[in-house]
Image: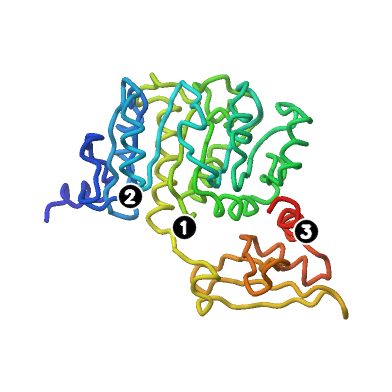
Amino acid sequence: MSQKRVKNDCLFPLEHLSAEALCENMPSCTAFLVFAGSAGGVHKVLKKLYRQSHERVFYTEDPLLNKIPIVLAAAEKGNIPVIVLYADNTPQAHAFLQGKQRVSLVSRGKETPGFLEDLCEKPVPEYFSWIGFQRYFTQPAFMGSLADHGMETLRLGDFREDPLAAEPLLREATHHFLDMRSVRHADLPDGICTSPNGLYSEEICTLARYMGLSRNFRMAVIYGYPASCPEGSQAAQLTAQVLWHLTEGLAVSVNEHPADNPEGFQKKAVQMGEDGQELIFFQSEKSGRWWMELPNSKYPAKPSYIACSVNEYVMACRGEIPMKWLFYYQKSNNFS
């Protein structure tokens, strides 16, 4: 085999496919990308990146914004992960949501009027987590509303202090929204409405990988970057690298859960004092990820399992009840 052939085989396996060809009998793929409008230079950059896994990724362009419903319906039927790239536009959240899905959002704040309200209130998602927001871009009253509905949040400063804290939040979601405007200006100088503070480029790529690792991943919407970004622009390169990390996460994700295959987990029980609540944790023997068991007062034989990090286990071992456990215990009693 020639050196050129070896080199090309290692490049990102991105192939064009029309939206109408998306069906159950199509070749297997990691994901299907939809560029709402033009792909700009993003897909050209992506094709030049080296892929660690080799299952193909298909893409199509939707210049008239009329193919997305077709793609979403076919992908749902065929259980194919979809990634929609919305460029300049902020999407209408409920154009992508049917019913009470499990939603995550990465954005810096409420700079887009109505988007967060649309995402969180019509109807309220079964699960919602908001990562990377900055308090000076966020109305305190809205944060109170999220808390009232039992939603999880992780502001930028807390994420930077402990990046692994974001992984369990994204693991629980099926539908992800990622705003490229959450990246700071120094890392995305040709972005849209950039701010001095925000996520580092490495951090948004890490979050994209965590999204892909979710076993229940259905869809991600990446938006807030310039549609006209040429191949050599910083915006095209970073958006392509976000896509690389997201699809790599999808390619290596592990379908595991303590309720489905308990034999693949180490069970760790922590007694909270002599007469205190016993907290049960599970650690995957395959991936090392953690879950904690939440008692069900109505159906004791059917506990629920909440994704967590090792920090919650360490906290319990110190004799402290983790805030995440208390949060979900209260939520199960008040919002079930």
* Badge 2: residue crowd in 10 Å (few <14, some 14–19, many ≥20): some
User: Going from the N terminus, do you reach mark 3 or mark 1 first?
Assistant: 1
Q: With respect to residue 122, does 57 lie above or below?
A: below
Disc 3 target residue: 326
Which of the numbered marks, if any, corresponds to residue 215? Answer: 1
Q: With respect to residue 224, does 55 lie above or below?
A: below
- Three-letter amino acid code at the position of disc 3: Leu
Disc 2 target residue: 51
Query: Which residue is pictured at 40% across the width and 44% down the height?
Result: 244
Helix, strand, or loop for circle 2?
Answer: loop
Query: Which residue is pictured at 49% across the width and 38% down the height?
Result: 97
- Which quadrant is the N terminus positioned in? bottom left
Q: Could you tell me residue 276's position as x and y percent? A: 85, 74
Which of the numbered marks, if any, corresponds to residue 87? Answer: none
* Residue 143 placement: quadrant: top right
Identify which residue, 44 or 300, lies in the foreground: 300
Identify which residue, 72 or 265, lies in the foreground: 72
Residue furthest right as drawn:
274
Helix, strand, or loop for circle 1?
Answer: loop
Q: CA distance from mark 2 to mark 1?
A: 21 Å
Residue furthest front as drawn:
298
Query: Which residue is pictured at 67% across the width and 35% down the height?
Result: 133
The coloring applied to the image is rainbow
**In this image, 263 relative to 331: left or right?**
left
- Which quadrant is the C terminus positioned in? bottom right
**In this image, 39 relative to 271: left or right?**
left
Q: Could you tell me residue 191's position as x and y percent? A: 51, 23
* Residue 179 placement: quadrant: top right
User: Going from the N terminus, do you reach mark 2 or mark 1 first?
Assistant: 2
- Three-letter amino acid code at the position of disc 1: Arg
